[in-house]
Image: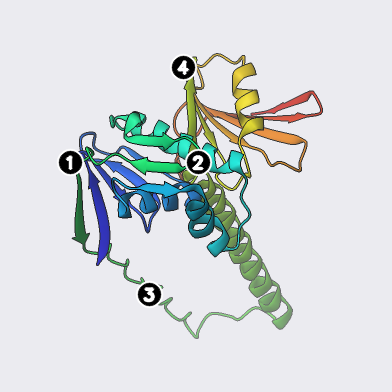
Amino acid sequence: MTQVYLLNGTVAFWPQKHKLVSLAEEGKTLALSNPASRCLDLLIRHHGEVILRDTFFQQVWINNGAQVTNNTFYQNISLLRRAFKEFGLNEEWIVTVPKVGIKLEAQLPIDIRDVEDEPVSPVVEPAQVPPVAAAMNKPPGIWRKAAAALVALSVCAAAGFFTWHSDIDNRLQHFVLLENLNGCQFFVNPDAVDFKKHQDFAQRFTEDCRTRPWVYLSAYKNFSRLSALSCREAFQVWGKNQCVTRYIFLGVNNDNT
């Protein structure tokens, strides 16, 4: 069984999966970064109480082997407020108590539900290949070895491609919404220490948001390069993702379709 929180009867929060699911709009979900998800879980478990900033630091970051700054902490609280607003919840339910901490207003109705875990897909056994008729002439040993090597190479290449494609898609699915600006939705890599580079780029973004409104930004504090993947639609696995990648490095832009 998995514990799920229902917020205001309209949004389901899955703490173990780090995501919000709209009950009012079918198919609308939002992946939260692990720290943001843990912050929300902590706020819900202490619903209506003020939680000290140091408690957040300890339980959300330090206990999980991560370092944290004040800026990172408030960035995650800001992301939660934006997520609330995106899902039709009052962002003011997340209250900052100056010089003390954060609390989740008691006025927000919260129900706890236990739901069944998603079933694991059964393993499909590969189909048996019928043996080649004995009457067929076997190729010489050197050709058999070459054929086997070619098959093995093809399998490895295919496996590598599927793994690479899956890794890219899985990574993008965990990007979190930073902000909606000028018709573009900016999503950012959740493992960044802070989102200052992402925000600066979003403020300077000059592309036409009517053609590629989904923008996925990747940047890290100790790297001078930022990548921006602009897509006509939300990125989907195996979908016809018409995207353009832009790399920003020391003021030089490189575009790849």
| Label 4 crowd (10 A; few <14 / some 14-19 / many >=20) | few
- Name the residue tied to disc 4: 183
| Label 3 crowd (10 A; few <14 / some 14-19 / many >=20) | few
Gap in Å between the C-alphas at discs 1 and 2? 24 Å
Image x and y of residue 126, in percent? 41, 73
Q: Using the image as rendered, state which of residue 228 and residue 143 is in the foreground.
A: 228
Image x and y of residue 208, in percent? 55, 13
Residue at 37 percent of width and 59 percent of height? 16
Quarter containing the C terminus: top right
* Farthest-out residue, front: 99
Gap in Å between the C-alphas at discs 4 and 3? 47 Å
Q: Using the image as rendered, state which of residue 159 and residue 185 is in the foreground.
A: 185
Image x and y of residue 136, in percent? 53, 80
Q: Nearer the viewer, mark 3 or mark 1?
A: 1
Residue type, label 2: Asn
Image x and y of residue 178, in percent? 50, 32
- Name the residue tied to disc 1: 9
Task: Give the mark, 2 or 4, whose residue is nearer the N terminus.
Answer: 2
Vertical position of residue 104 compared to residue 46: above or below: above
- The label shown at residue 125 is 3
